[in-house]
Image (cartoon, grey):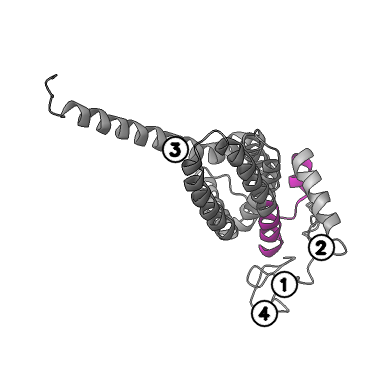
Amino acid sequence: MFCPHCGKEILENQAFCQFCGGKTTAAPSPGTGRRYTAWEEEGTQWSFGGLMTTLKETLLSPSEFFKKMNVTGGLANPMLYALITGMVGWMGYYFWEIIFHDTFLGYLPTKAQQGFDVFAETGLAVKAILTPFMLIIGLFICSGIIHLLLLIVRGAKNGFEATFRVVAYCSGANLFLLIPLCGAFLSAIWTPVLAVIGLRDAHGTSGGKAAFVVLFPLVMCCAFVVLFSLLVLGTIAASFGTMPQQPWK
């Protein structure tokens, strides 16, 4: 079949065009039990109610949500969902960063406070501008890596679109960043949990394969950080060992 908006060829029974994101006349595949998400359903699409319903379902009953989520609904809607939830969460995180930054500055000398203020204001402004671009780029990179690993372990029963949609709808966990102090920890823990559940149910694969493709990149990143830290510390220690000894005067 062909998209009625851009005219490009798409798969049969595909609800949204993967090229332009336009809605087609096709419905979710019959017999699969899958449906549009509340964020995509006609009548609640892009509405506050649809957003809140989708957030509630993904965060509180993820297995049920991903078992029913349509795996061929286009990339535009889930990407917009990830952008909104990501921006709200990170803006909240930056807000708490400013609050605790000001509290910390109260214990520093006046000149040091001025230097930190200039650095913080510039840094926060740059981060606020770059955040939406980083969210979208990170969404595609993360989805690509996860889908590649799924293909390697033969756990990709559906296409890249299914993986992308899972990763995007897991972004609702970014709203935990609105919680001061422990929000980043909650987001870092719950996001991989949602991803494992989502990949398992969206692709119909095993929980072990889903856990592997989610945790393997995290383990590799942690290993790289530890190795890099050891190299830096080793370099510093070696530099101290080669310093000329100064006699005591």
> Would you identify the image quadrant in which residue 134 lies?
bottom right
Q: Secondary structure at mark 1?
A: loop
Residue where numbered disc 4 is placed: 6
Left/right placement of residue 149 relative to residue 87 reads left
Write down the region rendered in magenta: 61-85
Q: Alpha carbon of mark 2 to alpha carbon of mark 1: how far?
A: 13 Å
**Mark nearer the N terminus (4 vs 1):** 4
Residue where numbered disc 1 is placed: 22
**Mark nearer the N terminus (3 vs 2):** 2
Q: Which residue is located at x 68 percent, y 37 percent?
A: 180
Task: Kindly report which numbered mark, 3 or 1, lies closer to the viewer in this rendering.
Answer: 3
Q: Please, what is the dominant secondary structure of the magenta stretch?
A: helix
Q: Secondary structure at mark 2?
A: loop
Q: Residues within 10 Å of mark 4 (few under 14, many from 20)?
A: few
- Mark 3 belongs to which amino acid? Met
In the image, 116 versus 139, the foreground residue is: 116
Q: Is residue 85 above or below residue 80?
A: above
- Mark 1 belongs to which amino acid? Gly
Q: Which residue is located at x 63 percent, y 58 percent?
A: 161
Q: Which mark is residue 45?
A: 2
**Mark nearer the N terminus (3 vs 1):** 1
- Mark 2 belongs to which amino acid? Gln
Residue where numbered disc 3 is placed: 220
Q: Quadrant of the C terminus?
A: top left
Image coords of residue 163 (percent x, y): 62, 52
Q: Quadrant of the N terminus?
A: bottom right
User: Looking at the image, can residue 33 be seen?
Assistant: no
